[in-house]
Amino acid sequence: MQSDAFLFEPPQPLPFEQGWAWQRSWRDALLADAAATEAVALLEHRPCYTLGRGADLAHLRFDPLAPPAPLHRIDRGGEVTHHMPGQLVAYPVLDLRRRRTDLHWYLRQLEQAVIDVLAGFGLEGRRHSGLTGVWIGEVKVAAIGVGCRRWITQHGLALNVNGSLAGFGAIRPCGLADRSVGRLSDWCGDLSVEVVRGPMARALASRFGLRWCATAPRLRGPMPRRGWAPIWSAEGHALHDRGRIGDRARHDTCRRAGDQ
């Protein structure tokens, strides 16, 4: 059975905070109304770093009080990762009670969506036992980290398409010291986020039984009033950690519904 969902595709890379606020707003709508329409955002972020709720600062190769780009601690699992233009980020805000209340199943479906997209470009994506994400050979091209509150999902996946990987040199991505990071354009030089966006929308729709709505409300999510704002600014000023882990904000902002 298919479930209606809005697909949001911002035309420009977004500040992380803007996406985070949108995602929390949509989560709250689903928490308030079990029949509310689900949503997925496919977007790019301006350069930033994010830390999972229990991420170890030892995986940073810079002073967290003077980061090279905004640094955020957020309510997802996993270690540190990097976002930048040229990376396609997918944020599904879904009610797993409409599918399976199983986070391991959900993570595997996100991985498989990436593997499906890669296959469409003649690339063989694979999993590594005991790890979350997608690799081509021994090179990691997609990171996955999720949050979930009362079976409403947030956060999601980040697929490196054709962006600069230089920012990954400032961290130990996902806490893995012995794994390299790559992008799809290393194998298919003409790929871009715009080219990959449609196949990703179709793969997610197939994996989660989604039917994209023809139009979407034009949301401009406010900046979070509660939860975690960036814990450090790019200028090195420490910000207060506002709110406990169960009471935080999350990701994204939007443009329109797609018809893929």
Image (cartoon, grey):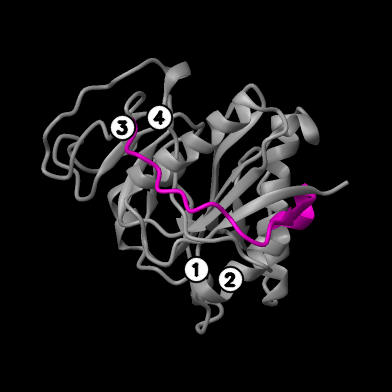
- Alpha carbon separation for disc pair 2 and 3: 33 Å
- Amino acid of disc 3: Ala
Q: Residue at x 23, y 50 (%)?
A: 69
Which numbered disc flags the more N-terminal residue, 2 or 3?
Answer: 3
- Element under disc 2: helix
Whole-number angstrom distance, CA of label 1 to CA of label 4: 25 Å
What secondary structure is the stretch in magenta mostly built from? loop
Q: Earlier in the sequence, mark 2 or mark 1?
A: 1
Between the C-alphas of marks 2 and 4, the distance is 29 Å
Q: What residue do we see at 66% from left, 39% from top?
A: 94
Q: Which residues, given as a range, are shown in magenta?
A: 204-224
How far is the residue under mark 4 from the one under mark 3? 9 Å
Residue 201 locus on image (x, y percent): 65, 62
Residue labelled with disc 3: 58
Q: Residue 113 location in percent, x, y? A: 70, 56
Q: Quadrant of residue 11?
A: bottom left
From the viewer's perspective, is the residue at label 4 or at label 3 nearer? 4
* 244 w.r.t. 93: above or below: above
Can you tell which of label 1 and label 4 is closer to the viewer? 1
Which x, y percent locates residue 137? 62, 63
On the image, which quarter does residue 33 sit in?
top right
